[in-house]
Amino acid sequence: MIRASSWLYIALIVIAITACVPPVEPPLAPIVSPPTLVKAATAVVPAFSTGAGQVCNPNDTTGESFVNAIQLLQSPNAPVLQPSPQYRRPTGAAFPWLPTPAADPIRQDLRQAFVQAPVYFRQALCGLNGIYINALACPGNNPRQCSGTAYQAGAWGYRSPTDLQSDLGFMYIAISANLWPNGGSAVPFDSHQTEILRNLLPVGSNVQVSPNTNPNTSWMTVLAALAHEVGHVVWARTAIPNVGQQYSLRPLIYCPAGDFFTGWDYNRMAAQHPDLVPPNRWRRFRMRNTEAGPPLRHSNPPSLDDLDNPAIANGALYALYQPGQPWASLFAAQTADEDFVETYAMAVLTGYNPNTGTFGGPLRSMPLIIPGAPTPPADVPGDLVGNTKPVLLNKMRCIPF
């Protein structure tokens, strides 16, 4: 995955199918004890300004204006990541919707994802300058001819770094057409999330998201894909307020609800916090090094080394997902920028209300089936909406929605 965590932010995942081997029962890593929950009636940071209404209507209760804003990506590759003058903006064409909207699974999934999302996320979507479906890896760039389990291949979200193409600061996202095998409904949410987990864990971990996830629908998969990519745009807007300028992480570090980066072992006093940001403003999938040089590490167990160790990875994952931990997901625990993105995405999926600190859904639970782990199963959204995930909730209070 490539990440441009400031003026150009890319999210690209190449999913590989890995062979399964019998799991090894691992020891469990220590669990961080829960801190005090900071209660707040309103958001503790200014709201994220989106320019809502630019491409769709966030108050549309049918989702049609959002669907009509979506284009089929036409660029020969993902947008060029290098600084100007190499930068090129993405280009799109009219999406090939089926003649009968009600019979088009892609359209229906997108409509439902939009309608089910909290209002601030609909505003963020409508505030984008371009929304694409990427079918470039599919035969003939046909979004109804995709196959395989690379559900996030070709997905990205970024903010433009240059005005050479008159789009300085413009915000774009793309999600993969692979979400919809052969043009049918998107894969169920548990399958989508399981593939992401297995591509971050050692081969043979055999971890999977339970089909008892609530809700476990195709449109939840689409909402998750959209939320992750928009999260990269929100990170860029939050971490680099002025396009192309220096990072400014102090509002997140000194958030009234607590340090957003509490899960990371970093130098809080350093200027621009180079140990929190990716080198040269770029991030590739599973790349953990930072501008300061060494990889960023967790402040408490389990460590990333534990999660990479086939002998103990399952136990480490179980510990990582316990109520007192600060992580929204295993993906969030990879780097500080992904931590922000996945926390934002979890807020969207669970319907977090920044004004009340409550959760309106749709996501209510997502239990993990972890071979060798004890019961009850790890369930981040279940713990969150059940008010037993205080560190993660406090981190959500720091995000400008």
Image (cartoon, rainbow, N blue to C red):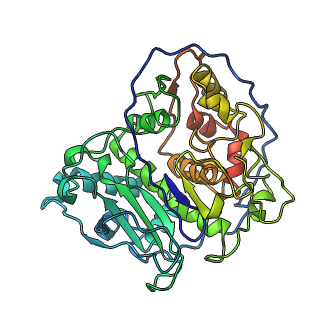
Q: Give the farthest residue toward the right.
A: 269
Residue 153 as seen in the image, left or right of residue 237: left
Nearest the eye: 324 or 159: 159
Vertical arrangement, residue 16 with respect to residue 65, above or below? above
Q: Residue furthest left?
A: 99
Tell me the residue at 77%/60% (across/down): 273
* Residue 302 picture quarter: top right
Q: Residue at x 73, y 34 (%)?
A: 324
Residue 212, x across and y down, in percent: 43, 27
Q: Quadrant of residue 40?
A: bottom right
Q: Residue at x 19, y 53 (%)?
A: 139
From this view, report whether residue 174 is shown above or below residue 346: below
Residue 107 image position (x, y, % from top left): 26, 56
Identify which residue, 383 or 248, lies in the foreground: 248
Point out the image quarter for the C terminus. bottom right
Question: Looking at the picture, how far across and down is residue 97, in whole percent?
Answer: 19, 62
Does residue 322 show up? no
- Pick the residue in front: 361 or 166: 166
Q: In the image, is 308 to the left or to the right of 30?
A: left
Q: Examine the rendering and report whether any part of residue 22 can be seen.
A: yes
